[in-house]
Amino acid sequence: MSVCKIGVVGCGSIAQGIHLNILPRLPGVEVAAIAEPDPERREAACRKVPNAKAFDDYQEVVDLPGLDAVLIALPNALHADAAVTAFAHNKHVYLEKPVAIDLDEAWDIVEAWQSSGGKVGQVGFNYRFNPLYRAAKERLATGVLGDLVSVRSVFSTAAAWNRLPDWKLVRETGGGVLLDLASHHIDLIHFFFGQPVCEVSAAVLSQRSEVPDSAVLNLRLAGGLLVQTFVSLSAVDEDKFEFYGSAGKLTVDRYYSVDVEVAGPRRDEATRLKAIKQGLHSVAKSPYLLEKRRAVGNEPSYQAALGQFVTAAGGGGAAGLRPDLLDGYRSLRVVEAAEESVRTGRVVALTGGDEATIHRVERPLK
Ligand SMILES: NC(=O)c1ccc[n+]([C@@H]2O[C@H](COP(=O)([O-])OP(=O)(O)OC[C@H]3O[C@@H](n4cnc5c(N)ncnc54)[C@H](O)[C@@H]3O)[C@@H](O)[C@H]2O)c1
């Protein structure tokens, strides 16, 4: 098996907590370089990958000869320059979400990737690889809920303002809950249904900084489905989806579910007993609980996402690999539409964005 030599640029909280713990364990991977300007973090990263060459700045790594791939976990405003340079120097790229801070930069990345002659371009929408969300997608596809009506989702984290880096507190450097958390759920909605968002309205709250730290998004998908998403950096730790249909409701809670839960449409004793039985059965039989307990960060999706990337970069092939950089672009379109809705107080209509036309989306005006 050929070894995939990878450079990790930006060794802050996600790289130290997740990427640099997973990559060394994956077969056929060598973390050959890291870049981090903060001396303490650089040293901490070197302790995790002692054979890696250490640099101060991502620019010294993204064009380094001998590297096959680069994992970009930089502040969001540096994503585009790092990704474009890495593709131009023949590297595969794993780019943390959001792909960039605006659509113009995101399109630069997409173009660099499309001109790279088939390099892997994966975006860090890792929750697509969470086993519960995969199971939810499969159950939804069976039609168990009858006619789908609406989706409600929440992605929120307990307030930790004193621990957020400065760049996360300012929109120009890529801060705010829309880029940080909403980008994930917008992508998951696309993962579940494969339909573009065609209408967006949003309201935001900025309690802790100039950027919104909480938001409610109302989306309509091209097929008509209504989606409401609440995201917050100032509330409680929660990540869940509820899907409503004419024949029942499917709930999946990434932190507390052990399996997807499907309830019938009526609120009667039989339905209640069935739900209790289903819950007990799930707890007793859940392979997910063990997988979760063993996973780095108690979240199995990170390893699965990185595993897919290094396999493809190591020669497994990039064809059809998702989530790709167009998925990153698609999610950012909805984030920008939400921001426009907040500015104008209007519902923003989006056209295109489906699988057939996203490649032909016009470059946004500079
Ligand atoms: N997929 C997920 O679930 C997930 C979770 C957290 C963060 N992220 C994403 O990962 C990225 C990093 O987030 P974070 O929370 O780790 O932020 P962070 O600020 O903790 O880490 C970023 C690191 O980049 C370093 N850096 C700054 N300038 C640099 C340069 N010129 N060269 C090299 N390194 C430089 C900083 O010193 C810092 O250590 C962001 O894009 C974020 O959205 C994704």
Image: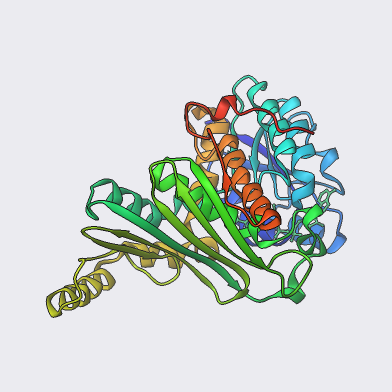
141 or 64: which is nearer to us? 141
Q: Is residue 276 above or below residue 322?
A: below
362 or 242: which is nearer to us? 362
Spot occupied by residue 48 in the image (x, y as percentages of width and height): 69, 57
89 or 202: which is nearer to us? 202
Q: Is residue 71 left or right of residue 359?
A: right
Determine the residue positioned at 79% across, 66% down: 210
Classify the position of the C terminus by image quarter.
Answer: top right
Spot occupied by residue 296 in the image (x, y as percentages of width and height): 54, 61
Give the image quarter of residue 193: top left
366 or 213: which is nearer to us? 366
Visible in this render: residue 40? yes
Spot occupied by residue 127 in the image (x, y as percentages of width and height): 49, 54
Determine the residue positioned at 23% across, 47% down: 142
Spot occupied by residue 136 in the image (x, y as percentages of width and height): 34, 55
**Furthest residue to the bottom?**
269
Q: Exactly how many numbered labels are in the figure?
A: 0
Q: Is residue 355 above or below residue 299?
A: above
Give the image quarter of residue 275: bottom left
Visible in this render: residue 20? no
Determine the residue positioned at 57% across, 55% down: 201
Q: Is residue 329 left or right of residue 273?
A: right
Q: Quadrant of ligand 1?
A: bottom right
